[in-house]
Image (spheres, rainbow, N blue to C red):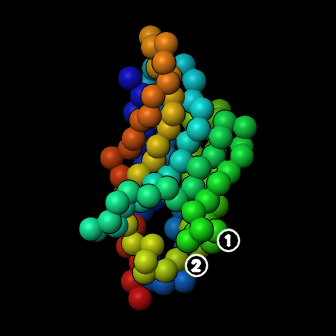
Amino acid sequence: QVQLVESGGGLVQAGGSLRLSCKASGSIFKINGMGWYRQAPGKERELVAGISSGGSTNYADAVLGRFTISRDNAKNTVYLQMNSLKPEDTAVYYCNAEARALWSGNYRDYWGPGTQVTVSS
C-alpha cells in the first residue's frame, strides 16, 4: 500500500504565503506523476498543479504565476509553494500520486486525506 500525508495548511491573510508538503510512504515501487488538487465548499475537486517524474509541470490558470510545484524524488515528496494567496484559494488541498506498489503490476492513483487552506480577506 502507498500512503500520502499532507502538511502545511492553515489560516493566512490575503497576500500571504503557505507551503504545502506531501510525503508518500509505504511499499512503493515507483511514483510517476504527482499533483495537488483542491476542493472548495459546494464545488468539484479541481487540479491545481501537477509535476511529472522528470520535473515537467502544469498549472491551473487561476494559480499560474502565484503557485509553484516541485518534488524531491529521493524523499518521495511533493511541495506546493503558494504566494499572493487570495480568498478564492480557500479550499481543502489534496495530494495525488500515480504510483505502483511493490506487489502490484499496475499503477493507480493514491490520495492524501487533505489539508485545509483558509485565506482571509
Q: Secondary structure at mark 1?
A: loop
Residue 24 pos. (x, y %) = 48, 35
Could you tell me which residue is drawn at 48 percent across and 18 percent down? 106
Q: Which residue is mark 2?
A: 84
Regarding residue 99, the answer to whether it shows in the image is: yes
User: Which image quadrant for residue 53?
Assistant: top right
Q: Which mark is residue 65?
A: 1
- Look at the picture and state if 95 lies above or below 104: below
Q: Earlier in the sequence, mark 2 or mark 1?
A: 1
Identify the secondary structure beneath mark 2.
loop
Residue 85 lies, with reference to residue 40, above or below; the image says below
Which quadrant would the N terminus be assigned to in this image? top left
User: What is the crowding at mark 1: few (fewer than 14 residues within 10 Å), some, or many (at least 20)?
Assistant: few
Labels 2 and 1 touching (C-beta < 8 A):
no
Q: Position of residue 44 (x, y in %)?
A: 34, 60
Which amino acid, mark 1?
Gly
The residue nearer to you, when weighing 94 against 44, is 44
Image point 43% across, 77% down: which residue? 88
Q: Residues within 10 Å of mark 2 (few under 14, many from 20)?
A: some
- Tell me where residue 76 appears, x and y as whole percent: 57, 35
- In the image, 68 versus 13, the foreground residue is 68
Amino acid type at image mark 2: Ser
Residue 16, percent from left and from top = 53, 79
